[in-house]
Amino acid sequence: MSTLTPAATDARDILVVNSQVVRGSVGGRVTVFALERLGHRVWFLPTILLPWNPDEGRGHRHVQDDAGFDALAENLITADLLPRIGAVVSGYLGSPAQAAAVARLVAAVRRANPRALYLCDPISGDNGDLYVPPETAAAVRDTLLPLADVATPNLFELQWMSGRRIESEAEAIAAARALGPQRVLVTSAPALRRNATCNLLVTPRATIAAEHGLVPDAPHGTGDLMAAMFTAGLLAGLDDETVLKRSAGTVFEMVARSVKRRARDLLLADEQSSLVNPMALVSCRRVLDAPLRA
């Protein structure tokens, strides 16, 4: 892992490795749009091409063969502009072998810029089930999570990656600390308030919870948006609590506005003000838990 601290790097380029859909606001389309709207230059390496979110119906899945994906990764590794990259954000993988290529990319970026940040969004499942093959989820767990400075699993992914059953906030904190990265942001964590959802940021020494109202029938892509906003906030030099509050506020506001307009997707283009200056109220609290000893 890198030794990134807030404001440690001026590099503004961000490498995104994620899925790409032709239509809709999920995967890399969300991450890239949000980061570019916030002023970052984005390098985008797609892991899979889909016509739309698979929940909308069957469609062709195009995954480039592993040799081709490796070749693209090697091209990027030798790019003379690699020192401009301040962060790598990885998400959905199209095959288990892609994890090794992403790991090589992360290592190359860190050689070029030792202060670069790596955020791993271990996209693999939700609502009690994996939606990638177990081999792909295992590759993320075993190859990418150990390299990450930040991980952003949802509650199911945290349970699967940690091998722990989680039914309380304390259990979520313990599982997050066992995962490995210095910062673990657990989305859809157990909330203290009724009809609320919680984003739980766990570090070795502290835990911060950001809670807001639960929006029924939320569009997909919220995890991709959270990963983008959290990365941008860290690169801007914001402290953990401010980054968490702004990121959660953006996601909450974007979801609420999209649902209010009865949209099936996040309305990123229509509601860009939520990316730049979210106004939604999100309550933050410091959790009194037992931090790890130094």
Image: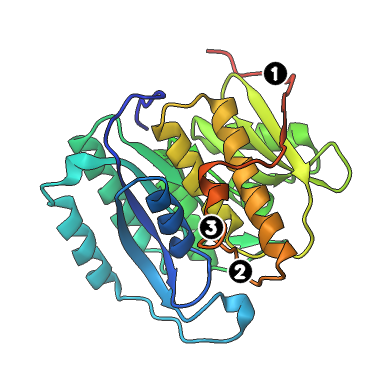
Residue 122 lies, with reference to residue 27, above or below; the image says above
Q: Earlier in the sequence, mark 3 or mark 1?
A: 3
Q: Residue at x 49, y 35 (%)?
A: 181
Above or below: residue 287 compared with residue 128: above
Q: Which residue is mark 2?
A: 265
Q: Is residue 63 left or right of residue 220?
A: left
Give x and y (percent) for residue 184. Answer: 56, 36
The secondary element bearing badge 2 is classed as loop
Residue 254 found in image quarter: bottom right
Could you tell me which secondary element the residue under label 1 belongs to?
A: loop
Judging by the rendered image, the residue that carries numbered circle 3 is 123
- What residue type is disc 3 on? Ile
Going by the numbered disc 2, the residue's amino acid type is: Asp
121 or 1, nearer to the observer: 121
Q: CA distance from mark 3 to mark 1?
A: 28 Å
Residue at x-position 52% and y-position 86%: 59
**Of labels 3 and 2, the one closer to you:** 2
* Residue 82 falls in image quadrant: top left
Residue 245 seen: yes
Residue wearing tag 1? 290
